[in-house]
Amino acid sequence: MKNQIYGEFAHHYDLLGWNRFARICAIRLANFVRLRGTGRESVLDLACGTGELEFQLRRTGLSFTGVDISYQMLSEARRKNPRAGFVHGDITSVRLNRKFDIVTCFFDSLNHLGSLTDLKRTFKSARLHLRDNGFFIFDMLTPTGLAGWEAVEVRKSPEYYVTINGHHDVEKGRAEVTIEGFVRANKDSYRRFKQMVAERSYPFEDIRDSLSGVGFDKIAVSSFNTDEPLENASRWFFVVN
Ligand SMILES: C[S@@+](CC[C@H](N)C(=O)[O-])C[C@H]1O[C@@H](n2cnc3c(N)ncnc32)[C@H](O)[C@@H]1O
């Protein structure tokens, strides 16, 4: 079932604005390499999605390899980035037999993993693909952030009409959202789509211990949204090595 996530929805992902988060991450990554690197780093982007990070940074000296489990997301990524490399794979087990200067994993992609075991396996994938002194940079929704999924939202524009109906299970630390609606197919008609996404959150201690368990000893964490104090953060931003 895993490879059915982000099927047809992949082709609407950017239109519906889901690529905006990667644009923020692109600015952060560009700033990071300006301050801490050379600007010519190789980057492995785990769960690269439609390749928006690669697209935003295509005119920099960074070189990208993206991995994703969705063939449809990868096809969007390849269309947008003819010069970057994209590989179909599962981030919990992918082995490219190459090392990179930086590994990234953005936009709750790690929350998509169904278990702490899969999260640890993905941290190991990141570790194995990093050069000595390389950085793993990622974000994760916190338990507080995932609780915010208990909501219903409607978004519309001349190009689409979308409802986002989320449910959060407090006890299990899991949430599920159904994204459903219509996108314009041509002047006279709309195409219907439906996508369900399930995510889970983990206590900070579990994330920290899982990182150190695979050899990430230096863990820097901040609130992704700079107006939220760390203790109430809805999303954590990690830079680890
Ligand atoms: C919310 S999207 C984020 C995509 C991209 N990083 C971004 O910032 O727009 C989550 C992505 O994770 C991918 N994904 C989920 N589980 C995965 C897995 N086990 N292995 C590889 N990719 C996975 C999905 O296919 C999807 O492209």
Image (tube, helix red, strand yellow):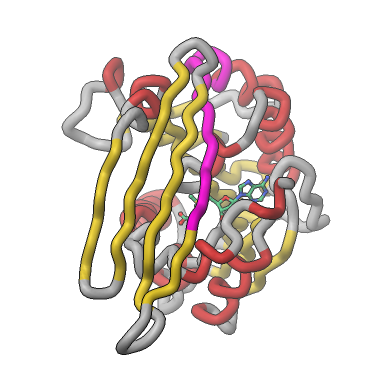
State which quadrant residue 7 falls in. Answer: bottom right
What span is colored magenta in the figure?
A: 194-207
Q: Residue furthest bottom?
A: 187
Quick check: 225 left or right of 57? left
| Vertical placement of residue 166 versus 37, above or below | above
Q: Residue furthest left?
A: 227
198 is within the stretch colored magenta:
yes
Q: Residue furthest front?
A: 188
State which quadrant residue 238 falls in. Answer: top left
Residue nearest the observer in this picture, 26 or 99: 26
| Vertical placement of residue 36 versus 83, above or below | above
Residue nearest the observer in this picture, 183 or 46: 183
Q: Is residue 222 visible?
A: no
Residue drawn at point x = 27 percent, y = 19 percent: 232
Q: How many labels, in total?
A: 0
Quadrant of the snapshot with the C terminus: top right
Residue nearest the observer in this picture, 50 or 35: 50
| Vertical placement of residue 151 versus 60, above or below | above
8 is within the stretch colored magenta:
no
Quick check: 137 left or right of 128? left
The spot of residue 152 in percent (x, y) is 29, 38
Quick check: 113 left or right of 24? right
Q: Is residue 162 visible?
A: yes
Residue nearest the observer in this picture, 215 or 83: 83
The spot of residue 9 in percent (x, y) is 51, 62
Residue drawn at point x = 47 percent, y = 41 percent: 108
Residue drawn at point x = 48 percent, y = 62 percent: 193
The spot of residue 111 in percent (x, y) is 53, 35
State which quadrant residue 143 falls in. Answer: top left
